[in-house]
Image (cartoon, rainbow, N blue to C red):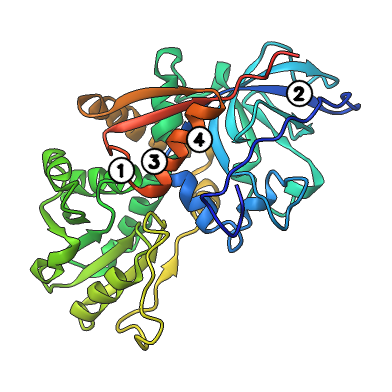
Amino acid sequence: MQRAEFAEVRTRDLPPTPLEAGHARIRIDTFALTTNNITYAVFGDAMQYWNFFPSDEPSIWGCIPVWGFGDVVETTVDSCTVGERLYGFWPMASELVVEPGRSDGRGFTDMAAHRAPMAGAYNRYQRVATDPVYAADREPQQMVLYPLFFTSFLIDDFFAAQDDFQADQIIVSSASSKTAIGVAFLAHARGRRVVGLTSSRNRDFVAGLGIYDEIATYDDLDSVPATPSVFVDMAGNQDVVRQVHTRGAETLRHSMVVGGTHWDHESDPDAGALPGPAPAFFFAPSQIAQRTAEWGRDEFDRRTGGAWDIYSHWTDGWLRLETATGEDAVRSVYAQLLAGTSDPRTGFIGSLPPRAS
């Protein structure tokens, strides 16, 4: 896609290059398409998401990262076996050549020089044979939901560690988004009061989830109780942020920036300073590093895996899975996500099979 104009997309047919020593070729099988991928584009420059899989014209075009599964089809290293299935962070493409390093029984890290400056959590590829959350019959749920739920878990853990900043309620924008749903599910399970902000179109869906104590539409934010609160912004709509901050100028304890589902909303550039606490971007890898150091990797996996198992099966009550195979189908889904017209119940599984030569 074009970095300056998200609606402009293209595909490129590039001939496979001979595999060099120390590399492995991964055939990307399936990947999830969610509004999270739009967030990667929105924050592509600020958070360096464009740098993971640079295009041949990196100043103009960018490749949106996706989460999914791939299979090793060629290798020159002992740490990868042909036929091995991996879960991780991929380009929206049919294959990826990686430089495996820091290998163990759980997986390996792509040591490509251009990925070195980025957070290690995005460069790690997990072997499904030893992945504690993997189940062959639930690959779609893992692709669509697990990266988002993992972020939700870290957000909820951050708030719990801070005693929710002594707030009475957690306000979440874009309440129909899958990351927001995960945050609400976990906070609700802790007995916290959760207020969801959503569009009129998605209100019934959000209400039907049963995890929000109160729901307000974007045109009725005055109904949100003015009580000590923390705010989790998934939408990136600065007019909504301003309304929440203005209404809670004296009671807002923390304002967290997570996503940008309302990426195309234009706000008043002359609105002035934002009341209340300055919004702080939540960077999940920092929380991962902190908890891994405090808990150890096994305990971290145990806690996230246990929470995921409960959540994953709960979503069976509302999640609908659809496949999008081939360039045209993937483009169509991407356009829906970009326009914000996709059904929040739907999880899309994309695939770009290599063209026959």
Q: Secondary structure at mark 3?
A: helix
- Dot 4 corresponds to which residue? 331
Indicate which label's residue lies in the foreground, 1 or 4: 4
Residue 114 against residue 80 in the figure, above or below: below
Which is more N-terminal, label 3 or label 1?
Answer: 1
Question: How many marks can you see?
Answer: 4
Residue 342 against residue 50 in the figure, above or below: above
- Graded by Cα atoms within 10 Å as few (under 14), some (14 to 19) or many (20 or more), the crowding at tag 1 reads many
- Dot 2 corresponds to which residue? 25
- Graded by Cα atoms within 10 Å as few (under 14), some (14 to 19) or many (20 or more), the crowding at tag 2 reads many
Q: Can you give x and y, in whole percent of width and height, for residue 181 in the image? A: 27, 44
Which is more N-terminal, label 2 or label 4?
Answer: 2
The amino acid pointed to by label 1 is Gly
Q: Quadrant of residue 112?
A: top right
**Residue 229 placement, left or right of 22:** left
Which is more N-terminal, label 1 or label 2?
Answer: 2
- Dot 1 corresponds to which residue? 182
Q: Are marks 1 and 4 in contact (CB under 8 Å)?
A: no
The amino acid pointed to by label 3 is Gln
Q: Are marks 4 and 2 in contact (CB under 8 Å)?
A: no
Q: Quadrant of the C terminus?
A: top right
Which of the numbered marks, if any, corresponds to residue 153? none
Q: Tell me what residue is drawn at x 8 percent, y 67 percent.
A: 223
The amino acid pointed to by label 2 is Arg
Which is more N-terminal, label 4 or label 3?
Answer: 4
- How far apart marks 3 and 4 lie (CA) works out to 9 Å
- Dot 3 corresponds to which residue? 336
Which is more N-terminal, label 3 or label 2?
Answer: 2
Q: Nearer the viewer, residue 341 or 289?
A: 341
